[in-house]
Image (tube, rainbow, N blue to C red):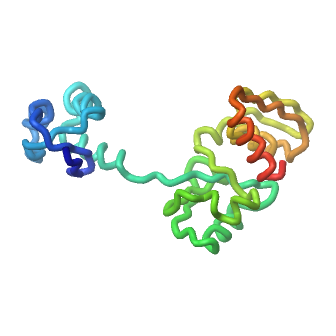
Amino acid sequence: MKPLNWHGALVIRGQHGSLMGSCARSSVNTPPTRYRMWPPVLPLIWRWCTRIRYGWERTQALCAANNRPVGITLRPNTLRITPEALAQRLQHEGLQHITPSRVIPEALIVQGTDRLDMLPSYADGLFQVQDQGAMLVAPLCQARPGQCWLDVCAAPGGKATHLAQLMLDGGHILALDLQPGRVRLLHHNIRRLRL
């Protein structure tokens, strides 16, 4: 089987095109009948077309949106650098696509590399790779200097180090994890961020 890209959805040549064909029969913009959807996404496509009744055109748009790269989110180490200064430094280090997050004011979204660990700014502890949803947690805790916090399942240390930043590195955080390799990763990130 050879994967093909058809209008933002991954399709595979095959002999069972009936489900997708029946899904798209009511639409003017129908897929080629000799293709079928990649099996793991087929139930989702079926649900969008029939149960939720998005129709084929809107389902295609959802598939295309789902296939767009979203970038990697960075949380600047605000104890050492501002988001603006980090963006300039990353551009100087060769990253071309850097945009501020619309969700987290200080976060940056970068595209064009998957080897952030090779950048000098990473080694200097100027940022932590962290999902935007995970970045929402520490501010909700309203952490202040002098407080004590417990973080279980803490590796790789995103939330724990974010708490430390919000506490201006003045407090206590007990960060735990069960797996020795993950604990080493946690220690590495704490040392790298100089917390």
Name the residue located 30 percent from the left edge and 49 percent from the top edge. Answer: 64
Q: How many marks?
A: 0
Q: Please identify the quarter of the rendering in which residue 27 is found.
A: top left
- Check the picture and name the quadrant holding the N terminus: top left
Q: Nearer the viewer, residue 180 or 147?
A: 180
Query: Residue at the spot x=19%, y=28% of the render?
Result: 50
Q: Is residue 63 left or right of residue 96?
A: left
Q: Is residue 171 above or below residue 89?
A: above
Given residues 139 and 169, the one toward you in this image is: 169
Residue 110 in view here = yes
Residue 87 on image: x %, y %: 64, 66
Up the image or down, 114 lies above or below 133; here it is below
The answer to which of 63 and 100 lies nearer the viewer is 63
Q: Residue at x 78, y 35 (%)?
A: 142
Would you say 39 lies left or right of 96 here?
A: left
Q: Is residue 139 visible?
A: no
Q: x, y (%) of residue 31?
A: 12, 45
Q: Is residue 13 left or right of residue 51?
A: left
Residue at the (84%, 34%) spot, across then down = 173
Q: Residue 179 location, x and y as percent? A: 69, 29
Image quadrant assignment for residue 135 = top right
